[in-house]
Amino acid sequence: MCSTDRGIALVSVIVVLSLALPLTWHLQTLARVESVLVHGQRQRLQTLYSAEAGIALTQLALREGLDPAEILLGPDGVAGTHDDRHVPLAGGNPFSFPDASFEVTVAAAVLDARRLRVDSRCEGPHGLSRAVEVVLDLDPDPSRFGSVLSWLEIR
């Protein structure tokens, strides 16, 4: 191999590397941005699902015998305190999903003898917040009791 061939090979390698380096940098930056976006979307979904879990736990508590009138008194059972309208969930607040940075509160109000409005709000990390408001059926018929009459996601 003569020195001219080696010079051409060196120039070829430099050209290929100079084209590959920006492409590699761009792909790495794109992957990092996508990772951040996916992480944020995951946290938003976890916040929404945690709020929805509050609704499901309220339905379960009602079906297991929680009197809607007890909700008006809150977990401490005393009227006129800070926890009035907060749903007394068995064993306290069971939420550790997905981790401790998600705080769920569930409040309810009796609309009439057959309807209960339940508001479940989850505060997640980085100021994320999702809320779900539903109206549940309090029909004495066990097949309908606790079923959802209306559902609204509040962002």
Image: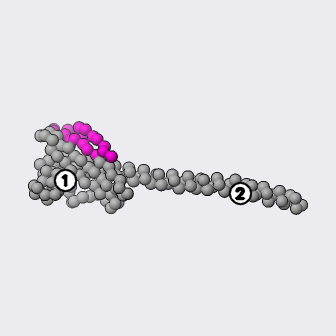
Q: How many marks?
A: 2
Q: Quadrant of residue 39?
A: bottom left
Q: Work out whether residue 145 can be spotted.
A: no
Q: Classify 10 Å Cα crowding around label 1: few (below 14), some (14-19), many (20 and above).
A: many
Q: How is the image coloured?
A: one colour
Q: Secondary structure at mark 2?
A: helix
Magenta segment includes 144: yes
Tell me what residue is drawn at x 15 percent, y 54 percent.
84
Q: Work out whether residue 85 can be spotted.
A: yes
Tell me what residue is drawn at x 61 percent, y 56 percent.
25
Residue type at mark 2: give it: Leu
Residue at the outermost left position: 79
The quadrant of the image that shows the N terminus is bottom right
Where are the magenta residues, as a range?
Answer: 132-155
Q: Position of residue 66 (x, y in %)?
A: 15, 50
Residue identified by numbered label 1: 86
Tell me what residue is drawn at x 19 percent, y 48 percent.
108
Magenta segment includes 108: no
Q: Position of residue 98 (x, y in %)?
A: 35, 57
**Is residue 116 placed above or below 73 in the rendered structure?**
above
Residue type at mark 1: give it: His
What is the number of the mark on residue 38? none
Front residue of 113 and 16:
16
Q: Position of residue 85 (x, y in %)?
A: 17, 51
Residue identified by numbered label 2: 17
